[in-house]
Image (cartoon, grey):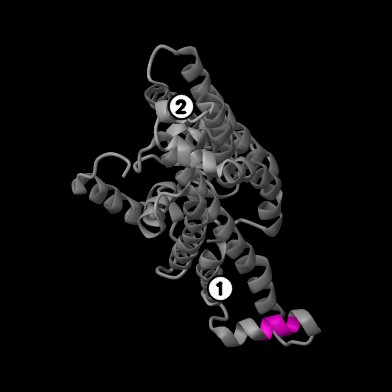
Amino acid sequence: MFLSRLPAAVLGLAGLALLALFSMMIGKYGSGPGPLFAALRQLVTGEGSDPLLATVLWNVRLPRVLAAVVVGAALAAAGATYQGLFRNPLVSPDLLGVSVGASLGAVAGIFLSLPVLAIQLAAFVGGLVAVLLVTGVGMLVRERDPVLTLVLAGIAIQALVGAGISLIKILADPYDQLPAITYWLLGSMTAVTRFDVFSILPALGIGFVPLVLLRWRMNVMTLGEEEAQTLGIDTLKTRIVLIAGATLVTAATVSITGIIGWIGLVIPHIARMLVGPDFRRLLPAAMMLGAAYLLVVDMLARSIASIEVPLGILTATVGAPFFLWLLISGKRGWS
């Protein structure tokens, strides 16, 4: 079975690598394969006549490509996990307030004029605190459906945190801080550096561990609470561990790029239609599709207009019609 899936995985990774190379060529300066290979030759041999081109490719575009791959894969993996746990294809990582909590942390950091690294740390902590609040409410209310309780608690926490963001936007300097806050909330990879990408890799690694190790338990969890308990699964502990992993992954990515919505909703559903609900195949498929999707969106963001279009606008333009299609199609249940 592993060997039968290997060719598809190799083809997927090869296609993703080609798409990443193509993304390196897209931009206002030095477009095309010729400048890319010239910059590569200059990097290896030190010989070249255009140092500006090498700077653009290796210090600007390469970090964006790496960030698109990492962030797209991470958000899609988190979305697939949340959808499996809640047995609902309309669930996304925003459900438990991860994104809005991270937004509050980042907005507060911008308002306080903190350095970039401190703003990223504040966003990371904000996302974790929001989820801890939601899960804490869920654990206090034991006599009701735990899934419904988490959803309702998430809605309440999102409304509360959203009010805090609005308050900070009102108090912010309208000429300096407010534009930075607004642009961050729309999502962008303009200012992402290689250090930013490498800085979140440890958190991503820790978050992915339970998603990979418990992938077979995720398949059992999709059968429902009672069925999973009958098969010997501690559903409460399993749910907490998986939610913690998905939350850590989401908070880490949001901390460097801002809010990039809809990936965690749209991509896992497409992956499920392609490879089925088996989480062992669904997780890698969603990650590759998420990385490819965000690469394409980022290329559009820096090429379709004279100014860069925020990623959140483009992902919403695709995600919202897809969400409406899911509702109109009238599909019920998890199958």
Front-most of residues 52 and 98? 98
Q: Is residue 98 left or right of residue 116?
A: left
Residue 3 shows which numbered tag?
Answer: none
Where is residue 11 drawn, in percent x and y?
52, 72
**Camera-nearest residue between 5 and 154:** 5
Q: What's drawn in magenta, residue-wise?
A: 38-42
The foreground one among 131 and 159 is 131
Up-down: is 235 above or below 222?
above
Q: Dot 2 surroundings within 10 Å: few (below 14), some, or many (20 or more)?
A: few
Q: Amino acid at mark 2?
A: Thr
Give the amino acid at mark 1: Ala
From where the camera sits, is residue 188 visible?
no
Name the residue beneath numbered marker 1.
14
Residue on which the image places disc 2: 230
**In the displayed structure image, the side of residue 10 where residue 274 appears, left or right:** left
Horizontal side of residue 133 vs 88, given as left or right: right
Which one is closest to the eye, mark 2 or mark 1? 2
SS assignment for the magenta stretch, majority: helix
Q: Dot 1: what SS? A: helix
Whether label 2 touches label 1, CB < 8 Å: no
Q: Earlier in the sequence, mark 2 or mark 1?
A: 1
Q: Secondary structure at mark 2?
A: helix
Q: Residues within 10 Å of mark 1 (few under 14, many from 20)?
A: few
| Horizontal and vertical percent position of residue 294 | 48, 60
